[in-house]
Image (spheres, helix red, strand yellow):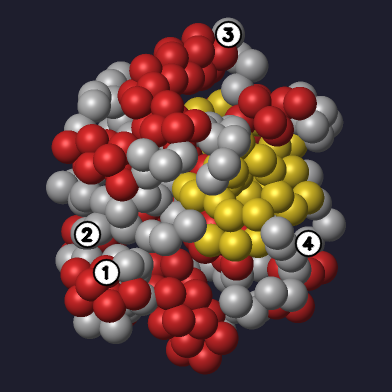
Amino acid sequence: MKLGITMEGGASRTVFSCGVTDALLEENIMPDYFIGVSAGIAYGVSYLSKQKGRNLIIAQKYMGDKRYMGVKYLLKSRNFYNIPFVFGEVPNKLEAFDFDTFEAFPGKVVACVTNLHTGKAEYLEVPRRSEKFEVLVASCALPVLFQPVKVGKRYYLDGGLSDSIPYQQAIKEGCDKNIVILTRERGYIKKPGHAGNISMKLYKKYPNIVEDLRTRPEKYNACMEELMEKEKSGEVFVIAPETLHGVGRTEADPDKLTKLYEEGYQQAKKQMEDLKRYLGMEEDIS
């Protein structure tokens, strides 16, 4: 068996997935292949470094901190999130990331990004010793909220523009068992929004990105429909929130974030017997 785990993005909503992965850590369920997009990979690395509870602490202590995000950073650096703080001071000083354990993780770790010029998804392996986390930042670089991020010789934007839930890449990599962790409820339908229109105007020099933005709702909804069909047929195992507890993309309220984290933890616990059965671990069920 080769186990793949895919984590959808969703900025603050991804705290749901942090509850799920902490529950998986308790059961010592670790993947052979991990792929995340946007906040899905940014938070997912703490699961792979086996730092149970780290993401919850960050959500509770720092998301509401004035140093974390805000319009003032968007006006100053054209990034809504204060990148030197979020991807620098927090993981390297305030809530230290365990690089040693992450480096020792034997599986493959991949971030989905979108090439600024081609508009196509690329799947970059995450470096194990990068204190600036450039690949993670690139995967999170949603238009308007971030500037494009240079990795190597290319510029990238949020991977969700081209591949919102990249579980198919895990299947292509040979994963015959796949857990997909969503940050939207089953049945959610994405609709064109005002932010998408602003982004299309902002990126008019990049027609492939504009096309990604224009077709994103349609592609997302088709992906979700296909995923739900695969769940019904037993091809993949999906864990999704029943409610978001009012948490939006840039939510900073620690109480709301804690409730959504607990939603993820409880959803994973509730589905754990079924998950172990799917993974062929029935003998471990007490």
SS assignment at label 1: helix
Decide if residue 146 is in sight here. Answer: yes
Q: CA distance from mark 1 to mark 4?
A: 35 Å
Q: Earlier in the sequence, mark 1 or mark 4?
A: 1
Mark 1 crowd level (few <14, some 14–19, many ≥20, 10 Å Cα): some
Q: Earlier in the sequence, mark 2 or mark 1?
A: 1
Asked if the residues shown at circle 2 and circle 3 are in contact, with their CB atoms under 8 angstroms apart, the answer is no
Which residue is at 23% across, 35% downward?
197
The residue wearing badge 4 is 105
Left or right of residue 255: residue 207:
right
Rendered image quadrant of residue 116:
top right
The residue wearing badge 1 is 74
Left or right of residue 13: residue 194:
left
The residue wearing badge 2 is 251
| Most distant residue in the bottom direction | 93
Q: Amino acid at mark 3?
A: Ser
Q: CA distance from mark 2 to mark 3?
A: 35 Å
The residue wearing badge 3 is 233
Residue 6 position, x and y percent, is: 59, 39
Which residue is at 78% across, 50% downward?
108
Which residue is at 50% across, 13% downward?
226
SS assignment at label 2: loop
Mark 2 or mark 1: which is in front?
1
Q: CA distance from mark 4 to mark 2?
A: 31 Å
Mark 2 crowd level (few <14, some 14–19, many ≥20, 10 Å Cα): some
Q: CA distance from mark 3 to mark 4?
A: 31 Å
